[in-house]
Image: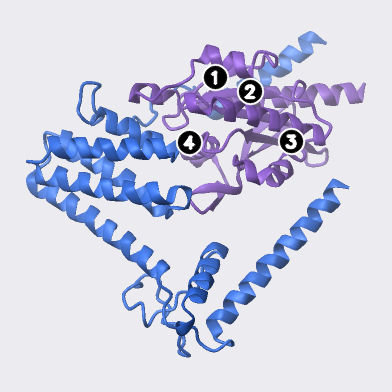
Chain colours: A blue, B purple
């Protein structure tokens, strides 16, 4: 019996060995090892904080981030590109600190992107000045884009009878003319709540956008109801 | 219990990656998928929620070939780790054959790991399964963060907190760099498939 069991276990292990090969991780991506700051580097603590944020957005980590960017801005005040990247990092950090888990998902991505490029610009010996400036302008563009997205989300567009000029990729430019279809129940709720806060901007009760939001709400409620029922049945 | 089709000589085995939120379960599957995608016929399916977290589950089918005359089809799942998705976690565990518990090595996650393991035990119990009997492997993830100056729990301490009673195979790992990701999965598959074979032999007398 034991011999049979061992033979089977050997067969399983051989098959897994054949399929996955040697599970050594020598080819594992060593992300940014070359540019990774050494322990004595001025950027070492910043990287530790940014990595902590990846896993836990707490008030403590965000406060540390803001304090660290503040400290580094003083150190890099003569390096315009690094200083500006730090300023961007500081602004995004303050926004995430204020919003915590409800912060726009792109803000975390932007934080990592700014940090990665900051590290690149500050530590790479081969990067040229024009390349550094190009990196900075890309990050500024991303920052502006996020800001615009947040503004669009915060301000409900005046509702008209016209069909929405739905071009998500080119939006948001003319907020007044664009009515974006809410993508998630959260944004629908937000949009509806903001609209309720500004009654003078609300259209007639049968406005197509409000109707669509109501329909979406009903649909979600119905979905949840049926899911709850299914769960109840499964438990019984 | 695994789905066995004696006609087509196929066995479908369900392996679930369980653990606290933001622990690296999805990153484990992403690493496996990226590394072996040339041998996979289906894509990794992930449903993300606001903020890039797993809302329902990730699903990665994996055909590892014939063992004991049967074609083994692995189905790797992750559960959403956040506390509020308790019902989804339970649903994903339905019919589970083996579990990889992905623990977070960060010092500040000590309690979360213990809660999640307890949660796993309770959810398995709802399907009349015991955490002490199910094929289980523990992974201590994020070991790479040590060199970034982030305080981590030592593997000894993690063993003491999570594996003192279970005494199951465990691996220090980094889902981000791939360290021990494949080893963890291989061990879990090996334990699960062997356990299934054992159960089947017992049934057949």
Task: Please say if the residues under marks 4 and 3 sit with CB atoms less than 8 Å apart.
Answer: no
Q: Chain letter for mark 3, please.
A: B
In the rendered structure, which disc, 4 or 3, sits on the residue that comes first in sequence?
4
**Can you see residue A74?**
yes
Circle 2 sits in a helix, a strand or a loop, which is it?
Answer: strand
List x then y, in percent, for residue B75.
66, 39
Residue annotated with mark 3: B96
Count up the numbered dots.
Answer: 4
Residue B31 circle label = 4
Horizontal side, residue B25 vs residue B34: left or right: right
Q: CA distance from mark 4 to mark 3?
A: 22 Å
In the rendered structure, which disc, 1 or 4, sits on the residue that comes first in sequence?
4
Residue annotated with mark 1: B171
List x then y, in percent, for residue B22.
51, 38
Q: CA distance from mark 2 to mark 4?
A: 18 Å
Q: Chain letter for mark 1, please.
A: B
List x then y, in percent, for residue A230.
80, 55
Q: Chain letter for mark 2, please.
A: B
Nearer the camera: disc 2 or disc 4: 2
Q: Is residue A148 above or below residue B44?
A: below
Residue annotated with mark 2: B137
Q: Residue at x 44, y 47 (%)?
A: A100
Q: Residue furthest right?
A: B205
Q: Quadrant of residue B205?
A: top right
């Amino acid at each position: 019996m034991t011999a049979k069991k061992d033979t089977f276990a050997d067969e399983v292990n051989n098959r897994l060995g054949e399929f996955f090969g040697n599970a050594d991780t020598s080819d594992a991506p060593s992300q940014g090892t070359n540019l990774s700051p050494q322990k004595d580097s001025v950027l070492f603590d910043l990287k530790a904080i940014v990595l902590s944020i990846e896993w836990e957005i707490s008030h403590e980590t965000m406060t540390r981030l803001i304090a660290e960017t503040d400290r580094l801005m003083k150190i890099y005040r003569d390096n315009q590109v690094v200083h500006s990247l730090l300023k961007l990092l500081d602004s995004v950090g303050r926004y995430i600190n204020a919003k915590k888990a409800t912060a726009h998902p792109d803000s975390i991505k932007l934080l990592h992107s700014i940090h990665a490029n900051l590290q690149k610009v500050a530590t790479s010996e081969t990067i040229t000045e024009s390349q550094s400036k190009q990196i900075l302008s890309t990050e500024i563009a991303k920052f502006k884009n996020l800001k615009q997205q947040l503004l669009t989300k915060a301000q409900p567009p005046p509702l008209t009878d016209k069909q929405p000029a739905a071009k998500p990729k080119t939006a948001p430019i003319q907020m007044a003319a664009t009515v974006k279809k809410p993508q998630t129940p959260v944004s629908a709720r937000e949009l509806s709540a903001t609209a309720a806060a500004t009654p003078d901007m609300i259209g007639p009760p049968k406005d197509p956008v409000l109707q669509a939001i109501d329909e979406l709400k009903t649909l979600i409620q119905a979905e949840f109801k049926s899911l709850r029922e299914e769960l109840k049945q499964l438990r019984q | 219990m695994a789905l066995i089709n004696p006609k087509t000589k196929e066995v479908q085995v369900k392996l679930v990656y369980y653990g606290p939120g933001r622990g690296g379960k999805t990153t484990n599957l992403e690493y496996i998928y990226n590394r072996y995608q040339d041998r996979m016929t289906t894509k990794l399916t992930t449903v993300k929620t606001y903020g890039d977290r797993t809302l329902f589950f990730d699903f990665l089918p994996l055909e590892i070939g014939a063992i004991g005359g049967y074609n083994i089809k692995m189905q790797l799942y992750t559960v959403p780790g956040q506390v509020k998705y308790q019902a989804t976690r339970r649903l994903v565990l339905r019919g589970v054959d083996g579990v990889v518990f992905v623990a977070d090595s960060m010092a500040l996650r000590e309690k979360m790991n213990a809660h999640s393991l307890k949660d796993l035990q309770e959810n398995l119990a709802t399907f009349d399964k015991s955490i002490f009997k199910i094929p289980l492997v523990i992974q201590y993830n994020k070991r790479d963060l040590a060199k970034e100056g982030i305080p981590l729990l030592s593997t000894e301490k993690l063993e003491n907190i999570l594996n003192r009673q279970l005494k199951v195979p465990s691996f220090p790992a980094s889902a981000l760099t791939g360290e021990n990701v494949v080893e963890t999965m291989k061990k879990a598959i090996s334990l699960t498939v062997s356990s299934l074979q054992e159960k089947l032999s017992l049934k057949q007398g």
